[in-house]
Amino acid sequence: MSTTAVPPKKTNRIGLEVLSYKGGKTTLCAGCGHNSVSERIVEVFFEMGIQPWTVAKFSGIGCSSKSPAYFLNLAHGFNSVHGRAPSVATGAMLANRNLMGIVVTGDGDTASIGIGQFMHLLRRNLPLIYIIEDNGVYGLTKGQFSATSDYGAKSKGGGLNEMHKLDCCLLGIEHGATLVARTFSGDKKQLQAILKTAIAHKGLSIIDVISPCTTFNDHPGSTMSYAYVKDHDIPLHELNFIPHFDEIQVEIADGETQEVTLHDGSVLRVKKLGRDYDPTDKMAAIRVLHEAEAAQEVVTGVLYIDTHAKDYFETLNMVDAPLAALPEGLTRPAKAALDEIMEELR
Amino acid sequence: MSTTLASPTLPSGNTPQQRVVNDFSIQVATANGSGSQTSNTVLMRALFQMGIPVSGKNMFPSNIQGLPTWFTIRASKHGWIARKKEIDFLVAMNPETAKEDCLDLQPGRVIVYDEPLKLDELRSDLHMYPVPFDKLVGPVCPDAKLRKLVKNMIYDGVVAYLLEIDMEEIHKALFKQFGPKKAKAAELNWGAAKAGFDWAAANLSKDNPYRVERMNGTANKIIIDGNAAAALGCIFAGCTFAAWYPITPSSSLVESMIGYFKRLRTDADGKATYAVVQAEDELASIGMVIGASWAGARAMTSTAGPGISLMSEFVGLGYYTEVPAVIFDVQRVGPSTGLPTRTMQGDILSNAVLSHGDTRHPILFPASPGECFTMAGDAFDLAEQFQTPVFVNTDLDLGMNNWMSDAFPYPEGPIRRGKVLSAEDLERLGGFERYRDVDGDGVGYRTLPGTNHPAASYFTRGSGHNEKAQYSERPEDYMNNMDRLARKFESIRAAVPKPEVDYAAGAKFGIVFCGTSREACRESQDQFQREYQRPVSLCRLRAYPFTPELGEFIDRHERVYVVDQNRDGQLHQLMKLDLDLTHLAKLRGVRYYCGLPIDARSITDEILRQESL
């Protein structure tokens, strides 16, 4: 009889193992950046101790939109219509405001067919984590340029992109998103910190993850290949996320670190790297993106955060309980109310 | 001044020489945006308050100000509230259309007109009442800017005098219309109505045949438009979520809902027990409705044909993912710059099969504000019980016009939310398979996101899934799913509202119709009986899929006329998908498609032509 002690499996603060956060086996290409994003989601939701069945996953159509099947199997998921995940997520979140909503889309989904829904999602500041797995290319239809491809980028077949790109982060900052970040699927630590910040943030989080397509957009001349992004990635700052359930260590303020307190009491500690950048300054955020484009740099980090703006539930003055769970006594007015209206119409 | 009726040459049979009491139509011709809506509503309400059955139909342009508009009020002691084809009493206020409107009248009819229009030069076979509106409005309305609006109330007074409408009822209707907050405006308008009445009493002689008399035909009735009725229906059905995009003629449906929601569904803490989103387009509206329904809210949208086109893919996805949705379609003419302010039964075919792949959707066809109210509840119950999008096809005539209706009954029985598993159910069952036909009715069990159980989740995606909601491209999985959806549609057939059937003894032929064709078809049945001594049966379809009662109705008649308010016979064509050949051989079509609400005479005449009578 073996007496070898089996080490206890690691559990998080709500007693779940990481297995409870896994998804199905990916069917995306080997090396696809999207798989890294799915892995980070699994890790971060586990570490934050989010109950998986309180999460709702949404996507549109495309390679990226397949990925909600590859994380959090214990969460409900809705693979919806191309470019229209924002509307489905909006309806679902308004029906049940206790859900934690996460949308995963791509650049075709968001910046082309779904740009209208994306823009109007921004205006509402609905609490939602909106991830764009951005590779500048249509993968599932084999390599056409997308609307986030850089001007002058070359396609695998040698074609030149002569259209200006849409910068989803710039749009997000300008039109109402209250957390806007850009990161790189290969930067594990930064992506984790940003995802955690988004989980703690009460409002719309736009996370543009440059996520290279190894099959159709990883060649010389591409501005979204692994090599190009590694070369041109300029982190704005070093991010440290301290969750509300951890004891915050006192750190001596040195003028190089800015703290942003989030709605649930968590703290995002932003340590400056070279430049003086304040992510709560909207105009600075817009400027840094324009400057980066001119300099052919990919600036990453938390570009903008506003922890004070009204969210959509407040705008609509909604009850605290989920609409979906309201009892009939609250949703069907009494007979006297109908009789009164009938009397007025006589 | 008196009327001019110079030896009219009146045709026989249709000659209003004797007194015609409580049985005529009034048409008011004005320019859009001139503020005539108030005076027309007051006139209609005054008749209603006198106990006379009425209907009011507004024929208006797609325009805010300036283009011609006509409001028709019908008074009918028989209770006929369809549009009457003939105009008996015209109030011509719009110089642009006055001449043509005057020339269109049949001899012996009445015209009240603005004196400078000099219509008496055009005809001598009408009862003509010129009124110097501009001279009358000055003294009663010192503010020159308001005169254009107040002028309209003068004709209410003139018409009241000529038809013998009780001025007390005009007063009551006027103050009801303005409400207590606008008492000052009501006083101003009341002064104008009185001035019109007094001037008419002093200057006009009542030598036309039309009169009103008090009767008891409106007891317990209300006046409401179908859109407001549908809004109330949704709220009393427990709707918690609405997403919409403004489009004529459906906009006032959700706008009414917003008003009633605030009044009826604000909780003790002043918070909303609902959410309404004005979306960026109809595609987003239906996406939000699907999302909200998926997460467990009772969710609806309302739109018209162009919005339906945009909703196509999502409605198909709703069908395949089996998510409830309620879609009110206030049908109208044409896409884009069609005739957005004219009525049509234009989306019967498209809604039945909207989207791509094999799709079928239930449609309810309300014929009255009362049914807009009750069928809202039916639609939510069907959508949630059968986990599928459900259409409610009203139209502009029903949605935007004022209808006399019975007061709405308070909904009976509990709200039916369908097969939804709770955390306790899951604990007991140990799990579930989303698309498995456990009960043999084609309807699986669903869970809502956020259900507090590790076994609650499933992944929602289009047609490529197996019973466990897992991704599958296996041919047999696809076919199994499609066959179950077909069985589900048969379950829906057994649950939708049955037709309203009226078998006439000895009838050789019958009429089948839906929605707002009802009033005109009932009146046509009466015309056949009174004028031609021919009994005619009626079958009003209240829902698609059609139920066996339709086949029985066709079996019992030699010929059946299908009345459609569209050119291509959409209701008729839809029957071809469902009925067998022996039934189809008996069907004939009556199609009415000029953009106006259908009238009885047009139906009667067309059937007479086809019957060679």
Image: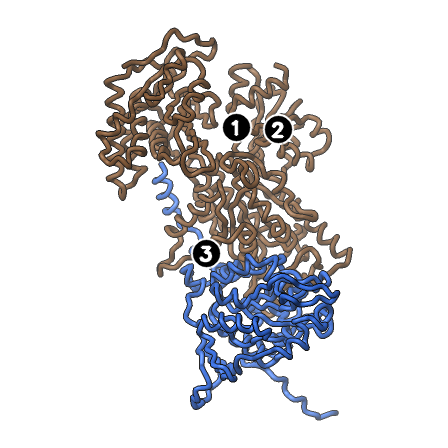
Q: How far across and down, in percent of the image, does residue B57 sit?
A: 44, 31
Could you tell me which chain the residue with mark 1 belongs to?
B
Q: Which mark is residue A37?
A: none
Q: Residue at x 63, y 37 (%)?
A: B547
Answer with left or right where residue B169 lies relative to residue B282. Answer: left
Q: Which residue is mark 1?
A: B598
Q: Is residue A255 visible?
A: yes
Q: Quadrant of residue B158?
A: top left
Instruction: Name the residue: 37% across, 47% down.
Output: A337
- Along the line of sight, the residue nearer the viewer: B363 or B284: B284
Q: Which chain is brown?
A: B
CA gap, disc 3 to disc 1? 37 Å
Question: What kind of element bears circle 2?
Answer: strand
What amino acid type is highlighted by mark number 3? Ala
Looking at the image, the residue that sits furthest to the right is B475
User: Residue tagged by mark 3?
Assistant: B275
The span from disc 2 to disc 1 (Cα, nearest Å) is 13 Å
Q: Amino acid at mark 2?
A: Val
* Crowd band around label 1 with a 10 angstrom C-alpha radius: few (<14), some (14–19), many (20+): many
**Quarter-of-image position of residue B87:** top left
Q: Which chain is blue?
A: A
| Chain containing mark 3 | B
* Residue denoted by label 2: B562
Question: Which is nearer the eye, B48 or B439?
Answer: B48
Q: Earlier in the sequence, mark 2 or mark 1?
A: 2
Residue under the image location 54 percent in, 22 percent down? B602
Foreground disc of the pair 2, 1: 1
Instruction: Sort mark 2 into few (<14), some (14-19) or many (20+) by Cα contacts within 10 Å.
Output: many
Residue B275, quarter of picture: bottom left
Of B550 and A312, which appears nearest the observer? A312
Residue A244 shows up from this direction: no
